[in-house]
Amino acid sequence: MMKAWRIHSFDGTYGMKMDEISVPHINDDQVLVKVSAVSLNYRDKAIMDGTYGIKFEKGLIPVSDTCGIIEKVGKNVKKFKVGDRVVNHFLSHWMEGEAKSNEEQFSYGGPLNGGLAKYIILDENSCLIPPKHYTDEECSTLPIAACTAWYSLMNVGGIESKLKSNQTVLIQGTGGVSLFALQISHSIGAKTILLTSNEEKKERLLKMGATHVINYKTHNEWEKEVMKLTNDQGVNHVLDVVGGDYINRSIRCSHTHGHIYMIGFLKESNAKINLFDALFKRINLHGIGVSPKDSFQEMINQLSTNFIFKPVIDTIYDFDDSIKAFQHLSRGSFGKIVIKLN
Ligand SMILES: NC(=O)c1ccc[n+]([C@@H]2O[C@H](COP(=O)([O-])OP(=O)(O)OC[C@H]3O[C@@H](n4cnc5c(N)ncnc54)[C@H](OP(=O)(O)O)[C@@H]3O)[C@@H](O)[C@H]2O)c1
C-alpha cells in the first residue's frame, strides 16, 4: 500500500485528500519510481480548481513534475536500471519534432497520474537522468517551467530565432517559467528586462543578473518604458505569460522580426491582436505547449556543462503539508514551490 494525495472534487476548495491505495503495477515498458520531490505549476492548481479547460476523473493523483528513484523496471526496459534517479518528461509521448494534436492526452498530473504519491509509474521513454549536481528538489523543478523557457528561447523557431548574446529579452513576471528564462538569458550574456509588481522582488531580480526591471503596477504603460530602455529599438524576444491585452503591448515594444512566445494567460485567454503593428513589425508569434523530450535532454546536457545556474526554489513543503503548498502557489511565489517526500 502507499499514501497518495487524490483529487475528489474539482471545485476550487483544494479538494484533494491523502488516501491509502495499492502500489500501481508497471507494464513491460514502464518503471516504478519512488518519488522524492515534486514541484508545483499553475496547471496543477487550475486542474484542482476545475478551471483548466479539460475535465479529469475523480481520484486523479495531481502534480506534473516529479523526481525520484527507480525501484522496479519492466521486462523491456533497456535504458534505465533500479537505483537510477530520474525526472519525468511531462508530455510523455512527444519525443521530438512537431507535436501531434493529442499530446495533452498523455501528460502526467492529468490525465495520467502525477507525482503527489509515494510511487509514480513512468514510461521508460518519458524518463531522463537529471543533472548530477542538482538536489532532488532542484531536479523536480525542471519538467514544465524550465523546459518551457528553454524550448522558447533555444529551440522553437530553429537556429534563426535562437536567443543570441547580443539580443534583449522581455520577461513578464517572477514565476517559475520567468526566472528560468532570466537565468538562461543571463547565462548566454543576453540583456533582460523583467516585469514585476513587487519592489522587493525587483532587488532580487537585479541580483540574479536582470539588466532592467520595470514595476508594471507603477508603470502602467510598461511597453513605453521598454522602448526607452532599448533606445527605441525594442526587444528581440518576449516571454508572454500574461496574455490578453499584453500581446499587443508585447508587439509594440518588439524589435522588427521579434519573437513573442505565447505561454500563459494569467490575465485573459482572449486577445484582439492589432494586425497593423504585427505585420509592419514582421512579428513571429509562437504558441508554446511545453516542449518535446529532445529539447529537455538538450537542456540537461547544457546544465551539466555550460549553463551553470541553480533553480530558484521559494519554499519546500513536507508531503503532509501539500495543501499548504497549493495555497502558497495561489498567493504567488518567487520561483518554484516544491514538496518533498521522505
Ligand atoms: N504554455 C506552456 O507550455 C506553459 C508552461 C508553463 C506555464 N505556463 C503558463 O504560464 C503562466 C506562468 O506560469 P508560472 O508557473 O511561471 O506562473 P507563476 O509561478 O504562477 O507566476 C506568475 C507570475 O506572473 C506575474 N504576473 C501576474 N500578473 C501579471 C501581470 N499583469 N503583468 C506582469 N506579470 C504578471 C506575477 O509576478 P509578480 O509577482 O512579480 O508581479 C506572478 O508571480 C501560467 O499561466 C501558466 O499556466 C504555460
Image: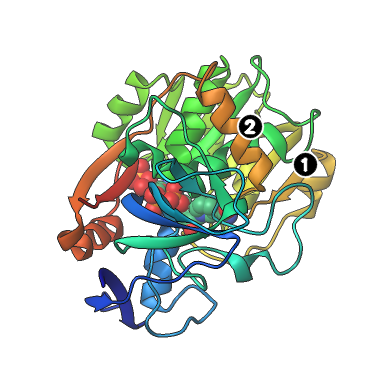
Left or right: 342, with 97 as reference point: left
Disc number at residue 283?
A: 1
- Give the residue displayed 58% in from the left and 32% down from the top: 299
Tell me residue 14's x, y (percent): 26, 74
Residue contact at pointers 1 and 2, CB within 8 angstroms? no
Tell me residue 198's x, y (percent): 29, 39
Report if residue 40 is visible in the image: no
Q: For label 2, count other residues whose C-alpha is less than 10 Å away and answer few (under 14), some (14-19) or many (20+).
A: some
Tell me residue 81's x, y (percent): 49, 44
In the displayed structure, would residue 27 be above or below residue 134?
Answer: below
Disc number at residue 298?
A: 2
Nearer the camera: disc 1 or disc 2: 2
SS at mark 1 in the image: loop
Figure quadrant of residue 46: bottom left
In the displayed structure, would residue 234 be above or below residue 340?
Answer: above
Label 1 amino acid? Ile
CA distance separating discs 1 and 2: 27 Å
- Give the residue displayed 72% in from the left and 41% down from the top: 156
Tell me residue 92's x, y (percent): 60, 58
The answer to whether the beta carbon of the residue marked 1 is less than 8 Å from any atom of ligand 1 is no
